[in-house]
């Protein structure tokens, strides 16, 4: 989007970007604390490829950024104010304030990420941990 676009066009573009339910969920999950893709997979129940596509759109819009920590990549909000926009939209939709807080980062059963399993070696990737677990 060019900076010369009209304000209403820029706002419309932002709403189009965050208008996907999965993207709203991702933004809510990483709203208070960074998360890796394997954590997003565990919370959302989606495949890594699908989550990565949504993250790419959010990164191009400068809403999230990625940072490598050990062998994992963690995503965080660049624009934390976007959560206030989403929360206000939830109120307009008739939801109670904080309705999306259930998605906030927390340990998730079966998630191999370092945040859900603080005792694991941070040098291991989520993929390594997932593949070494018995089925």
Image (cartoon, grey):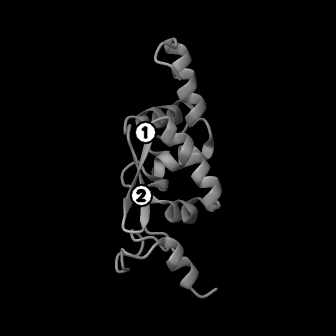
Identified at 54% across, 39% down, the residue is 95
Can you name the residue that lies furthest to the bottom here?
134
Residue on which the image places disc 2: 74
For the C terminus, the image quarter is bottom right
Identified at 64% across, 57% down, the residue is 49
Residue 42 visible in image: yes
Q: Secondary structure at mark 1?
A: helix
Q: Residues within 10 Å of mark 2 (few under 14, many from 20)?
A: some
Identified at 43% across, 60% down, the residue is 73
Residue 85 against residue 39 in the figure, above or below = above
> Nearest the camera: 102 or 19?
19
Name the mark on residue 83.
1
Residue 13 against residue 53 in the figure, above or below = above
- The Cα–Cα distance between marks 1 and 2, rounded to whole angstroms, is 18 Å
- Find residue 15 and report its image quarter: top right
- Find residue 93 and report its image quarter: top right
Q: Residues within 10 Å of mark 1 (few under 14, many from 20)?
A: some
Q: Secondary structure at mark 2?
A: strand
Numbered disc total: 2
User: What x and y, as percent, mark residue 37?
Assistant: 51, 60
Residue 106 against residue 11 in the figure, above or below = below
> Nearest the camera: 48 or 11?
48
Q: Nearer the viewer, mark 1 or mark 2?
A: 2
User: What x and y, as percent, mark residue 131?
Assistant: 57, 80
Left or right placement of residue 38 versus residue 106 in this view: right
User: What x and y, as percent, mark residue 20?
Assistant: 62, 40
Residue 126 against residue 47 in the figure, above or below = below
> Nearest the camera: 123 or 55?
123
């Amino acid at each position: 989007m060019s900076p010369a676009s009209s304000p209403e066009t820029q706002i419309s573009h932002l709403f189009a970007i965050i208008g996907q339910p999965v993207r709203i969920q991702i933004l809510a999950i990483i709203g208070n604390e960074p998360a890796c893709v394997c954590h997003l997979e565990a919370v959302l129940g989606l495949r890594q490829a699908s989550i990565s596509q949504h993250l790419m759109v959010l990164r191009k819009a400068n809403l999230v950024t990625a940072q490598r920590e050990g062998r994992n990549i963690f995503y965080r909000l660049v624009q934390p104010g976007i959560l206030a926009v989403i929360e206000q939209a939830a109120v307009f939709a008739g939801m109670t304030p904080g309705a999306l807080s259930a998605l906030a980062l927390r340990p998730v059963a079966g998630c191999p990420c370092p945040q859900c399993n603080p005792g694991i070696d941070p040098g291991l990737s989520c993929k390594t941990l997932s593949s070494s677990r018995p089925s």
